[in-house]
């Protein structure tokens, strides 16, 4: 089993300083220093400078939070509002070897129908209380369209699950990897051009192709994307990977299906 300290050693060997490993050998949900104070409630230059900090993912100028440069300037007044941190997870392995992903959740202050921001190493999603229940308890309900099919959760033998958990930890080592997951097959992400030859991306992002059957796409929206035939699960916030809001469809990836509870 890989350790977070082991990930630090690998990043040092690769000569890469843009990582999210904390002094306590956990994985921060924020982006790498010197921008690690950037979070909802603070608008900094990095919000419009992802192409400068992460050209291996965004080779051309970007808009807000890595969005296409030509997109409407969205979110700044909302982002600069007063927010309260209501949930925080630093990535780590627990005593049983289960990986818990880094993620933070913020609630917009002084709203009768509160809105939330999920923030994860530079990616974000805006959600409403009416959509997401139990968020402040660290739980989230996800939905996936199944059409006329039956949803069968993947089954992992112990050896493959151990390899997969090691991969998950590495995939949260740097925003270089987290932001690369916005390379979805939709026109909203046409400006994302991942450099697969970069050592960190080659080491920690590319192996994900071997586990694409495990890290399954869901959504925070029930009606918007899927229509009447869907499956829903409830899981911990530290068991998800978020694609950022501008990719569309409220996409969330369920990391470890064994930690999710089937609802319907």
Image: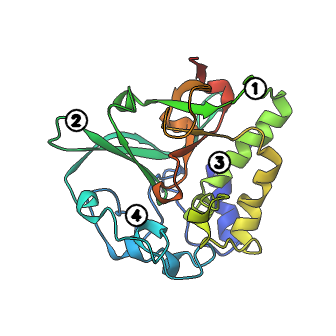
Q: Which residue is painted at 47% across and 68% down in the image? A: 67
Disc 4 secondary structure class? loop
Q: Say which of marks 4 and 2 sits in front.
A: 2
Disc 3 secondary structure class? helix
Most extreme residue toward the left is 110
Gap in angstroms between the C-alphas marked 2 and 3: 35 Å
**How many C-alpha atoms fall within 10 Å of the one at disc 3: few (<14), some, or many (≥20)?**
many
N-term mark: 4 or 2 = 4
Direction from residue 115 to residue 100 in the image, left or right: right
N-term mark: 2 or 3 = 2
For the C terminus, the quadrant is top right
N-term mark: 1 or 2 = 2
Instruction: Give the camera-side residue of 255 and 249.
Output: 249
Could you tell me if residue 77 is visible in this image? yes
Direction from residue 50 to residue 46 in the image, left or right: left
Say if mark 1 contacts mark 4, CB within 8 Å.
no
Say if mark 1 contacts mark 2, CB within 8 Å.
no
Above-or-below relation of 138 to 197: above
How far across and down, in percent of the image, does residue 241 sit?
Answer: 57, 46
The residue that label 3 is drawn on is: 169
Gap in angstroms between the C-alphas marked 1 and 2: 36 Å
Q: Which residue is painted at 61% across and 72% down in the image? A: 57
N-term mark: 3 or 1 = 1
Direction from residue 154 to residue 62 in the image, left or right: left
Above-or-below relation of 236 to 108: above
The residue that label 2 is drawn on is: 113
Disc 1 secondary structure class? loop
The residue that label 1 is drawn on is: 149
Gap in angstroms between the C-alphas marked 4 and 3: 19 Å
N-term mark: 4 or 3 = 4
How far across and down, in percent of the image, does residue 203 sit?
Answer: 75, 63
């Amino acid at each position: 089993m890989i350790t977070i300290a082991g990930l630090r050693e690998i990043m040092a060997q690769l000569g890469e300083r843009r990582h999210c490993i904390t002094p306590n050998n956990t994985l921060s949900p924020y982006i790498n220093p010197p921008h690690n104070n950037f979070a909802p409630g603070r608008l900094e230059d990095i919000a419009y400078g992802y192409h400068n900090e992460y050209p291996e993912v965004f080779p051309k100028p970007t808009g807000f939070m890595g969005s296409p440069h030509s997109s409407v300037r969205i979110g700044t007044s909302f982002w600069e509002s007063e927010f309260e941190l209501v949930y925080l997870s630093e990535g780590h392995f627990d005593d049983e070897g289960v990986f818990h992903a880094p993620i933070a959740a913020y609630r917009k202050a002084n709203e009768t129908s509160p809105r939330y921001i999920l923030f994860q190493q530079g990616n974000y999603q805006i959600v409403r209380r009416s959509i997401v229940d139990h968020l402040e308890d660290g739980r989230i309900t996800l939905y996936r369209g199944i059409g006329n099919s039956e949803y069968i959760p993947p089954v992992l033998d112990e050896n493959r699950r151990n390899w997969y958990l090691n991969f998950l930890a590495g995939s949260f080592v740097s925003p270089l990897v987290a932001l690369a997951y916005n390379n979805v097959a939709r026109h909203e992400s046409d400006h994302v051009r991942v450099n697969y030859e970069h050592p960190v991306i080659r080491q920690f992002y590319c192996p994900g192709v071997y586990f694409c059957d495990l890290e399954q796409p869901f959504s925070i929206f029930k009606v918007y994307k899927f229509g009447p035939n869907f499956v829903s699960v409830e899981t911990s916030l530290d068991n998800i990977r978020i694609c950022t809001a501008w990719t569309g469809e409220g996409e969330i990836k369920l990391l470890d299906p064994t930690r999710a509870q089937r609802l319907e």
